Image (cartoon, rainbow, N blue to C red):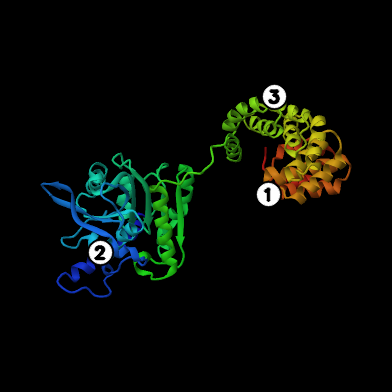
């Protein structure tokens, strides 16, 4: 896998460099990929201003420079956000990456859209130093060239992605980098940053070579809680932004420019004032129970008769397992006339969890009558009824729970079938009880101890079919 990733990472750049060396003294062939610029253009690109070879790093080992592409309407003294088109593979003599068609046209295109585009030299023997140097220059001296060093984006493609992601994960990464677009490179091995919006684009032509690392990437993003956007470029090859002259490619380029502008330019602010109520709703829908409780505590002090607030407060308190406080909130809502299903369901679930089944049954019934007709409500009502000896009612409600769609699994459908079987056994309907136990086993509920010790199943244990079922269960 490591060898495969290495081959993939250098493939495009290696092809370009071999082509360059073979044609060093010759006119470029139309098949030389360095000829081709980005496949998207707008009229304003013709008016973009270019300053070439601005030094960003000078030392005894030489001088490295950038080309700066400024928007046609850029004014003296104004500072604009900038996008750096990364060279993380280095230059070979006069074969400078920033002189390739793609690295001359991409920065020109972003400049035509109001940002500053930057292409760069890099020393292949000190890539990380080159990257540190260019971003330190933009941070400290960018203002001299109309660049806002606190609002920087970047583009890294193909083999450039590896060095770029290493830099971004390092302690040297510039604080002003606010958005990274990674095009058709290998899956980053470096730690994913949780603070950097990243657009990661996979070309369909590359996907087979990326292997299991690509399949695992989204899980890594979720675990890091990183603001990533993963896009699959269907039907497009490696380096599609230079070689696929079609609208599918152009749409991705449009989306990339919009991504940079969204994160580098100020977001228009609304005309309205912030709303405490909206903040509460956001916390509630975000399942942030502690924040919901904190916000609703203040809200209820000012709005003590708001039954919706009291119901939501009870739900959040339940999530925090503060059941006594949740009960008080639900009961207050009910005393004020609340009749939405949430208040009955919430209080009913608390009573059910506390095994106060006689109190839970009317509350869960009211929740269902008020509209909470889902498998959880029917299932909890059914279980409460079985616990109180109402076996026929419990079985009917379990049937309704299955109709409503109990999720598959040992602890969902499996437990529900087991409980139904207990009801049938108590009613003396042994055949149905055994059929239903078979369903419980098929769904994965194989807790042998439950089958051997539950008193509800006492009448079945002498049955040959029951004994045969036990042989299929793992020993306790």
User: Dot 1 surroundings within 10 Å: few (below 14), some, or many (20 or more)?
Assistant: few
Q: Give the Cα separation between the discs numbered 3 and 1.
A: 32 Å
Task: Identify which residue is drawn at 86% across, 41% down.
Answer: 393
Task: Identify which residue is drawn at 14% across, 51% down.
Answer: 63
Assess whether mark 1 and mark 2 are in contact (beta carbons under 8 angstroms). Answer: no
Numbered circle sitting on residue 324: 3
Above or below residue 281? Residue 265 is: below
As drawn, the residue found furthest toward the right would be: 428
Which of these two is toward me, 156 or 213?
Answer: 156
Find residue 33 and report its horizontal and vertical position in percent: 28, 69
Numbered circle sitting on residue 100: 2
Judged by depth in the image, the label closer to the viewer, 3 or 1, is 3
Q: Classify the position of the C terminus by image quarter.
A: top right
User: Dot 2 surroundings within 10 Å: few (below 14), some, or many (20 or more)?
Assistant: some
Task: Identify which residue is drawn at 80% across, 50% down.
Answer: 435
Q: Give the Cα separation between the discs numbered 3 and 2.
A: 69 Å
Q: Give the Cα separation between the discs numbered 2 and 1.
A: 56 Å
Mark 1 lies on residue: 408
């Amino acid at each position: 896998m490591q060898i495969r990733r290495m081959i993939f990472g250098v493939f495009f750049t290696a092809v370009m460099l071999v082509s360059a060396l073979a044609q060093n003294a010759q006119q470029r062939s139309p098949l030389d990929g360095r000829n081709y610029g980005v496949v998207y253009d707008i009229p304003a690109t013709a008016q973009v201003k270019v300053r070439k070879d601005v030094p960003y790093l000078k030392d005894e080992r030489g001088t490295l420079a950038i080309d700066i592409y400024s928007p046609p309407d850029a004014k003296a003294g104004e500072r604009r956000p900038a996008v750096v088109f990364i060279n993380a593979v280095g230059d070979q003599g006069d074969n400078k990456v920033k002189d390739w068609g793609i690295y001359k046209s991409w920065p020109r295109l972003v400049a035509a859209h109001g940002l500053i585009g930057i292409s760069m030299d890099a020393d292949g023997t000190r890539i990380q130093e080159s990257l540190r140097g260019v971003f330190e220059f933009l941070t400290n001296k960018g203002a001299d060239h109309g660049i806002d060093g606190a609002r920087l984006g970047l583009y890294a493609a193909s083999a450039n992605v590896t060095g770029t992601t290493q830099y971004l994960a390092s302690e040297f990464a510039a604080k002003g980098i606010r958005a990274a677009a990674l095009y058709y490179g290998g899956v980053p091995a470096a730690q994913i940053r949780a603070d950097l919006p990243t657009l990661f684009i996979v070309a369909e032509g590359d996907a087979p070579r990326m292997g299991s690392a690509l399949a695992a990437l989204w899980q890594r993003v979720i675990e890091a809680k990183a603001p990533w956007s993963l896009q699959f470029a269907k039907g497009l090859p490696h380096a599609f932004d230079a070689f696929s002259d079609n609208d599918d490619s152009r749409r991705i380029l449009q989306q990339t420019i919009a991504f940079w502008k969204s994160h580098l330019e100020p977001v228009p602010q609304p005309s309205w004032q912030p709303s405490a109520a909206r903040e509460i709703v956001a916390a509630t829908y975000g399942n942030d129970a502690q924040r919901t409780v904190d916000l609703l505590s203040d809200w209820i002090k000012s709005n003590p008769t708001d039954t919706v607030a009291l119901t939501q407060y009870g739900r959040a308190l339940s999530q925090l397992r503060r059941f006594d406080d949740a009960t008080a909130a639900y009961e207050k809502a009910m005393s004020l006339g609340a009749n939405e299903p949430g208040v009955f369901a919430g209080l009913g679930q608390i009573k059910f969890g506390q095994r106060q089944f006689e109190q839970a049954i009317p509350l869960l019934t009211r929740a269902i009558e008020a509209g909470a007709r889902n498998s959880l409500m029917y299932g909890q009502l059914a279980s409460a009824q079985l616990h109180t000896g109402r076996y026929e009612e419990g079985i009917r409600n379990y049937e309704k729970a299955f109709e409503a769609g109990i999720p598959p699994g040992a602890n969902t459908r499996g437990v529900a079938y087991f409980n139904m079987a207990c009801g049938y056994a108590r009613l003396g309907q042994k055949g149905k009880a055994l059929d239903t136990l078979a369903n419980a086993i098929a769904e994965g509920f194989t807790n042998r101890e439950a089958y051997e010790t539950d008193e509800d199943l006492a009448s079945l244990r002498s049955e040959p079919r029951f004994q045969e079922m036990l042989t299929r269960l793992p020993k306790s």
